[in-house]
Amino acid sequence: MHCLSTSIIAALAVILSCGGAQGQKIYGACTNYEDIHPGTFPENPMPGQYVPQCNQMDQFEVIQKHPSTGYKWCVHPMTGEKLEGSDVKPGPAQPECGKCFTALSKFYFGQSDFQGDGFFAPQCDSKGKFSNPQLGYSYSWCVDPETGIKIEGSEVVNTFTKPAVVAKCDGRPKRQLQKVYGPCSNYAETHPGSFPEKPLPGQYVPQCNNLDMFEIVQKHPSTGYKWCVNPMTGEKVEGSDVKPGFLGGLFSNPKCGKCFHDSAKYNINAAMWGIGGYPPECDAKGLYKAMQGGASKGLGPTWCVNPETGDAIKGSEVAAGAGEAKC
């Protein structure tokens, strides 16, 4: 499994560097940050205005720099959350970011030397250190938090389809579904108490899938209400609430925008097999943005779509470098 997945990641790096993919980004953390923090990426920033710096995988650059003050600091590559105390004054010195942040960023380019299992990314805590235990496709294991080096003999075989007891890295066995470290775990990091080890009866805990994205339809275990969220951010679609219905709401699911579903599918395919084509871009309601393609990233052709279905509007495509589709 490890050799196959390593080749997948290597192929992904090649795709990103070749003209065929035109260096296109996936629809990831940095773009989502723009969606939920309007004005973060202004088209015409004021002189000296800070604009988060992203890499070609649409993650945050681990080291951010303010163009006006010259200060530098570390951030989590998937959330943009600042590592407190990492600020460095203007000059040649670079901030010391946790090795896990750097390994996580490199992982998606096939450059990481992290001793993982298959193509599962290293899991980091909020300080940039490696989390314990690490979870892979077939087993879990303990690591040195500073270096990520596997502690020999700590491996515990995992199952993929049901909860398993994972490696005892702190003397306490933990039961949880294995998953990659993505936006749902990051939500727990930035919203303490969202994933309590022992939730109170009826307490809402965000529901995640095995790629650690948010389940598009969320449900409150106490009230029975359901609602839609953006699978990458957990942001609620206002007005999507559905009251409990027949058999506790079994037949009363909210109607979430098709773009959210397609975005989730795209990210799953990208994680499993690499990137192909352009990821769908969704608005806050889960509808397709009128213009799709590579223009928002400065890449590729653009075209207009039906906001409800995502179907391309015939004759609307504009070639790369020839402007943007008029939608």
Image (cartoon, rainbow, N blue to C red):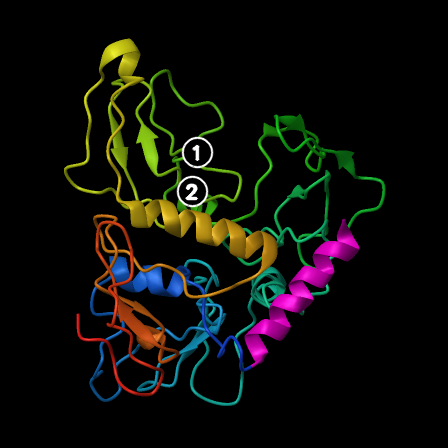
Q: Residue at x 32, y 76 (%)?
A: 295
Residue 274: x %, y % from top left: 57, 61
Residue at x 29%, y 41% (from the top left corner): 229
Q: Quadrant of residue 54?
A: bottom left
Q: Nearer the viewer, residue 268 or 107?
A: 268
Q: Where in the figure is residue 82, as x and y percent of width and height?
A: 41, 63
Q: Residues within 10 Å of mark 1 (few under 14, many from 20)?
A: some
**Which kind of residue does numbered mark 1 sit on?**
Phe
Residue 122: quadrant of the picture = bottom right
The quadrant of the image that shows the C terminus is bottom left
User: Does the magenta run of residues contain 3?
Assistant: yes
What amino acid does circle 2 point to? Ala
Residue at x 61% of width, y 54% of height: 121
Q: Is residue 141 left or right of residue 300?
A: right
Q: Which residue is mark 2?
A: 188
Q: Residue 102: give its label.
A: none
How far is the residue under mark 1 from the one under mark 2? Answer: 6 Å
Q: Is 122 covered by the magenta stretch?
A: no
Write the start and end of the magenta stretch as one range: 1-18
- Is there CB contact under 8 Å for labels 1 and 2? yes
Q: Main secondary structure of the magenta part?
A: helix
Could you tell me residue 292's position as x and y percent? 30, 66
Q: Secondary structure at mark 1?
A: loop
Earlier sequence position, callout 1 versus callout 2: 2
Q: From the viewer's perspective, is residue 111 above or below residue 171?
A: below
- The percent position of residue 128, horizontal first and vertical second, equals 55, 59
Q: Which residue is mark 1?
A: 195
At a point 22% along the width and 43% down the height, the residue shown is: 237
